[in-house]
Amino acid sequence: MRTALIPAVLLASASLWGASGPQLVTMPGKSPLVTFRFVFLTGSASDPAGKEGAAALTAAMMAEAGTRDMTYKQIVDALFPMAASVSRQVDKEMITFSGTTHVDNLQAYYKIFRDMLLSPGWRKEDFERLRDDAVNYLKVTLRGNNDEELGKEVLYTRIYAGHPYGHENTGTIASLQKMTIADLQAFYRANFTRSNLIIGLAGGYPDSFPKQVVSDFSKLPAGPPKAVRLPEPRPPKGVRVTIVEKDTRSVAYSIGFPISVKRGDPDYPALLVAQSYLGQHRMSGGLLFERMRQARGLNYGDYAYIEYFPRGMFQFEPDPNLARRQQIFQIWIRPVEPANAHFALRLALYQLDKFIKEGISEEDFERTRTFLTKYVNLLMKTKNAELGYAIDSRFYGIGDYATYVKTSLAKLTREDVNRAIRKHLRTTDLDIVAVAKDAAGLKKQLVSGEPSPVTYVSPKPKEILEEDKIVERWKIDVRPEAVTIIPVEQVF
Amino acid sequence: MVPAIALVLLGCVAAFSAPAAQKVFPYEYDQHDFPNGLRLITIPTDYPNVVSLYIVVQAGSRNEVEPGKSGFAHLFEHMMFRGTPTYPPAKYEATLQKAGAASNAYTTDDHTAYHTTFSKEDLETILGMEADRFQNLSYSEEDFKTETRAVLGEYNKNSANPASKLYEVLRDTAFDRHTYKHTTMGFLKDIEDMPNQYEYSRLFFDRYYRPEYTTTILAGDVNPATARALVEKYWGAWKRGSYRPEIPAEPAQQGPRKNHIQWPTETLPWIAIAHRGPAYSDQQKDQPALDLISFLGFSESSDLYQKLVIQEQKVDVFGADTPDRVDPYLFTVLARVKKPADLDSVRDDILTTLAEFKDKPVDPERLDKVKKHLRYSFALAMNNSEAIASIVARYVALRRTPETINRLYAVYDSITPEDIQAVAKKYFNENNRTIVTLTGGNAQ
């Protein structure tokens, strides 16, 4: 909740900034590197209707364009010898600017970083380049090059249709084509306020540096913190299927539904254990991975999530500062051969159903809890990540994330997990998104409910073959009217 | 304690213009060779509690010398997770989980690396378990066949990206005999045939998963003496092998080559312009000079990037690279062009820029900025123990010691504008060139 954000004063002199922000998170140290992580509590959920993508394009105009005093070329030239840059990340409720510099270059780097955030140049040529980039990201990168991320993002647009989370963060091609610099300037004025800002600094900066930064950024307009009102998402009755049709070798799936659990909520630790046991991201120990890839060779991997995790095919740990007030439970099935597509979907839902009904064993519970208790340390291996997690903890109104996870897991019982999965997880009233070439064929299979036997390249143990007999007939109640086929050219 | 990184960075700033720069790899490390040929490199860092283990096997897709066997080094990386009599897969996974470990592996042209990051108290457990799978890997033909399908799944998920296809065709076109002709994933026809190659997979393990091909790197909260003792205990009995592959040498290219890919769906056009380059070296100037050229001519701060991406906005992805390889590889400039009609002019601009490096020496001040950029980038990247182990692994795959990093950066420092010009003259010739283009949908 936004209201849980308490302006924390970590410096001796508090008078420079009050309840109207900016807030400050500092991690001073002896490292010669200084890390900046500035998070604005705004994002694509604040995009005005018809201006989808305004938040993302505004952030791009700040981080990858000129300032009032410098062209983008001058900025690039100045940063190049420092090997420094300014990165941006845009999500529904957070926009993050981050960078690291050697302390030798601190003032030179900071001046550029500050001016990019406080005095964007709004040049037409920068705008046109960055808008092209945004359109091409949707058209070429998402639609064209990455079926897995495409499926995941379409899943979110389906679950949150008509909701402030309902569009891809980059926007839509139609809205981007109509966007003007004036739209972005209006978004900037309304949302990049000091009360929306959390300043994160880590490393070997001089003692006086945070005060200088806070003073500079207090020049942002005050602007009351205003959280966008988020209605409860309305999941479908039964199973809703969206098939994105495109010329591709295989079938990629994302499955999900909203959950009412986020960090800080009583059932978060229990669902953290559940998702790790079911499918810890990019690790080979999860149940789905073991049953689908290891035992059957159906694909490259299968994972489960209770928090938004974009770009998962490129990285092992999640990025911080993707905090949201509403989350979904999600299963990611990596591309499967078209002949096994129906079976793979059945197997994933069968495993989920079995897990909900049978729960986690004491041994698996203890093992998963031990794993998470140690693994949480690895999430914060860099100062940049540590700052990010600290800022997220402000958002969720919890203390230090590692301590929060360790303390709450220590108190958790197997029964807590089994109760939580029965309460929050399900195999109906959910969305399935498939990216497939033969969309009509896949729809026909799913609607028919006919058995979908699988064939293997090698003999399989009896236990697998017996399970297959159940799985190949596993009922997914898909009504024809609940299936939508969308040509890839029409998504986003 | 002030991290060692501070000393080197402070040193670097003063040393950028001086010929004898401070060492760019600042960590004290212990390098030890065991009698069986295994090498251990232990790097204590200032990051507490966590240890990162990288096991580097100097065998990658370069070692796939027999026809029809492309992709095997990568397949073998998958097979290494199929268990031993002592640690069947479920027990292996359970042990990793109890250690809170993050574990994975990757394969490249020249090496395969297995990496695990974990809490320091689990050092002995992890080292013992990893030693077991390197010595006692055991999998059935059924498991082998199942795993080949996971590899096909990996090919499938990559195949949606036109850039994957571009690299596949570029290598196939630029090389005739050397195994760099195929990518690490391998040719699709070979991947499809993998289920029939169980015996070959055993042979691959027997040839290359040997101590003399392997270097173990430990970075983090770790004591070198303890590490040596544990590695001796668990890896000491590993038997040395005898196999030496004969990697076919690539004959000199005799003329320009080109190829085109028609991508079935709408996408933006790509162009790759490659010239045959040298192998990695920390002694000769050729490869380091080409590294510098990739920044001078094609990085974000270069004139051509500014022209094509920022001003004219004809291109939205742009850069050059000259990857470090054991054998001579390619210097490649890559561009994604927004309109098919601009492909030719972008090609001409790239060729003009390459020719300029031959025609006149570069501005010494700009060369210094690139050298400074490289040093700061390197130092900024080493921001945790896993990153340090991962960076060292890449170099260990080439020269089996972190010292090669310091030697390489010393070569960078020694390179003059005249050296750049000489290297450009040597490599940027038409007879040495391969151009591959890709267009989508109806564009030709």
Image: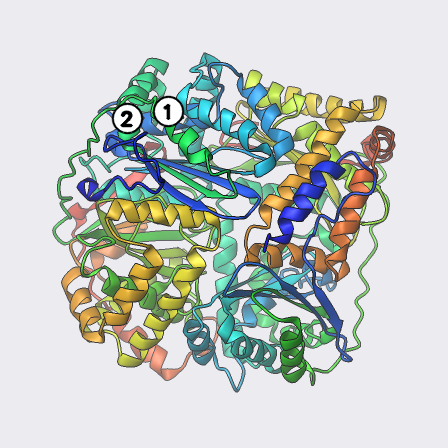
Element type where label 1 sits in the image: helix
**Residue in front for this viewpoint, A467 or A145:** A145
- Please report the residue visible at 80 percent of the width from the left and 77 percent of the height from the top: B242
Q: Is residue A310 visible?
A: no
Quadrant containing the N terminus of chain B in the rendered view: bottom right
Looking at the image, is mark 2 or mark 1 nearer the viewer?
2
Q: Is residue B154 visible?
A: yes
In space, the residues marked 2 and 1 are separated at their CA atoms by 10 Å
**Residue in front for this viewpoint, B359 or B215:** B215
Identify the disc placed on residue B394.
none
Location of residue A107 (image quadrant) = top right
Q: Position of residue A399 (x, y in %)?
A: 28, 54
Amino acid type of disc 1?
Thr
Q: Is residue A78 left or right of residue B158?
A: right
Q: Which residue bears the numbered disc 1?
A: A58
Q: Position of residue B301 (x, y in %)?
A: 63, 26
Q: How would you rate the neighbour count of disc 2 (Cα within 10 Å): few for under 14, some for 14-19, many for 20 or more?
A: many
- Seen in the picture, residue A371 relative to A142 is either above or below; the reply is below
- Residue sitting farthest toward the front: A12
Element type where label 2 sits in the image: helix
Identify the disc placed on residue A191.
2
Q: Report in which chain the residue with disc 2 lies.
A: A
**Residue in front for this viewpoint, B369 or A426:** B369
Q: Are marks 2 and 1 on the same chain?
A: yes
| Cβ atoms under marks 2 and 1 closer than 8 Å | yes
Q: Earlier in the sequence, mark 2 or mark 1?
A: 1
- Seen in the picture, residue B82 relative to A148 is either above or below; the reply is below
Q: Position of residue A36 (x, y in %)?
A: 46, 38
Q: Report in which chain the residue with disc 1 lies.
A: A
- Please report the residue visible at 63 percent of the width from the left and 45 percent of the height from the top: B379
